[in-house]
Amino acid sequence: MQFLFPGFLAALAVIAIPIIIHLFYFRRFKRVYFTNVRFLKEVKEETSNRQKLRNLLVLLMRCLAIIAMVLAFAQPFIPLANQAKKGERAVSIFVDNSFSMNALSKDAPLVELAKQRARDIVSAYSVTDRFQILTNEFEGRDQRLVSQEDALARIDEIRINPASRDLSKVLIRQQQCLNTGKQENKIAYLVSDFQENIADVTNFRDSLLEVKLVPMRAVQERNVSIDSAWFESPVQILNQPANLLVKLSNRSDEEAADIRLSLRHDGQTKPVGALTIPARSTRLDTISFTILHPGWHEAKVSVTDFPVQFDDDYFASFYVAERINVLAINGQSANKYIENAFLGAKYFRLDNSDARALDYSRFSDYQLIVLNELNAISSGLTNELKTFCQNGGNVLVFPGQSADLASYDGLLQQFGGGNLGAFDPNPRQASQINTEEFVFKDVFLNKSANLRLPATQGNYRFAQGRGEQILTYRDGSAFLIKFPQGEGALYACAAPLQEQVSDLVRNGEIFVPMLFKMAIAGTKGRQIAYTIGKDEVLEAKHKVSASGESNYKLKMVPENAGQTPKDAAAGGEFIPEQRIFGSKVMLTPGTQVRDAGWYQLHLLGDSTLAEFAFNYDRKESDLRFKTDEVLAKDLPANMSVMSASAEANFAQVVDEQERGIVLWRWCVVFALLFLALEVLFLRLWKV
């Protein structure tokens, strides 16, 4: 047996006090007159013997009570190992506060039970030990060791949070904090529901850190989640129907029937229908709606599902241009066929410009730039076109019949296209069209043999093995080729646009949709939704406000007109980290986005510059957990599982696991028993 506080054993000297009182206790006698002392003598002798016995027993109870109380303060224990841990300890406790911890146990949400477990663990240690309380937020303030009192206060502050961490990363974080302390004895606790997709504790390789796994067990939950949504077409067009594809998952072992699906678009909610999803399956559904106005649009797809609700809504935002702007840079005069193609389309606007009088600063206003038979391309124009494509624009090149090959080589090489071969005056016929590429995808209802493809009376040759061929000659060489660059692309035609060289301009089945789709492709925006805690960088066009302000801020959009936006601390409005690269600004919101919803990007006093939709991580939607047996399997020697069945006094369980069989509670019980026996002897034993 050993003692946690052996210094208290010195208090055993207090036993001398009742012994001294007993030895020097002299009873005061009262004089009584009797006529015959023979009977008095017999009574006196009998009473004296009984009194001595009672006094000895009372003395013994008092001494034993004092011994038991002193031992209780010294905290004796029987170590289970050969040597018990001594000295101060550094204890790290991770409390899982992810969405899955909102599931119910028998009496309360798991997160509340986890917080109580954390309190029990802290209380089981000494006031001289140091503690780290860690949650999924990985906040900087939690990366230090604090006192027992501060640890208990921090536990009270824990709330459910959308962040979710792999437990191997949690252990690394705990190890880093524990290594900052001077304590030799270090131990880490993981209080979690141990979802299968995060419980990778065996990936933690440090065998010196003692790790205790404390599982939380919920009643079986059912859950249907909206995992993601995306548009069937990458570009949405004004006054045209848009098809939104929605992926839903049934995360339970039972069929989910009559799941109500609805769409909220621009403030109006409409039911979509009811779905049935088999157990452990996914379902893809299509929602169609018409876009009636230009600008930023907000959409939210929802299902009705209880009790897990954090994944029942999926937010999306997207931009629809009022018109698509096209710039034709002409080597000589404007091409009438290009003008006629856009003339009857109100959604498109065509501007013509002479190659010798270009305003590069306006390139960002266009979605498609057409190089119409330029004889030479300057290095400055080449660099501007590359930047234009990297930022999402598209460029279409029709070379001049007397083109300067060196200048065209410079352009193609910037886009990874190699050199342009000399002009070949032989006639050729295009024979293949790539209908999987966006330019011609979904253009033809039925690709029949009667589809007339362009023919040329001469053409340039592109380097073999470069780019993606969209229209191909019979000999396998490219008539129209694509070179991706950043978010845009360079499209190059092998033949000039002159009628006497190419009949492309007279082929309305090919020429007009080709121009339209290339221009539309230049409006392809960023992704329609982001994941909280995963998507670290947002991108938008850089702008300076009228007042010269260039500090961007994100502001959460209230779902209802009368709803007040949340304050900055809750993720309502904040200034993210921002970096400017040319015409773009890169925003890093970090942990400031905490709630799912729409966030508008503003400059001081300006209208909305962009809009972003954030959703909670669906990692927490899968409510499959590792059992105690699965957790314990293949664990390294430094890790162990503290069974979830230890409900009664978890602090005592921790105490015994740390020090062995703890005896101080028994000492308190015996001290009370001895004091009770003393009272009984004094009250009931009459002498």
Image (cartoon, helix red, strand yellow):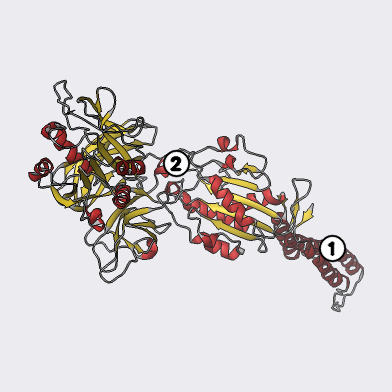
Determine whether, in the image, residue 21 is placed left or right of residue 530: right
Determine whether, in the image, residue 379 is placed left or right of residue 33: left
Depth check, front residue: 366 or 255: 366
Q: Could you tell me residue 247's position as x and y percent?
A: 31, 37
The local crowd at label 1, few if under 14, some if 14 to 19, many if 20 or more residues have their Cα within 10 Å, is some
Q: Could you tell me residue 80's position as x and y percent?
A: 74, 46
Do callouts 2 and 1 mark residues in contact (Cβ within 8 Å)?
no
Q: CA distance from mark 2 to mark 1?
A: 59 Å
Residue at 75% of width from left, 49% of height from top? Answer: 79
Residue at 58% of width from left, 55% of height from top? Answer: 120
Q: Quadrant of residue 374?
A: top left
| Amino acid type of the residue that numbered disc 2 sits on in the rendered structure | Val
Above or below, 114 relative to 626: below
Depth check, front residue: 365 or 162: 365
Q: Quadrant of residue 601?
A: bottom left
Residue on which disc 2 sits: 219
Residue on which disc 1 sits: 56
**Number of numbered discs present?**
2
Q: Earlier in the sequence, mark 2 or mark 1?
A: 1
Above or below, 337 relative to 605: above
Depth check, front residue: 513 or 5: 513
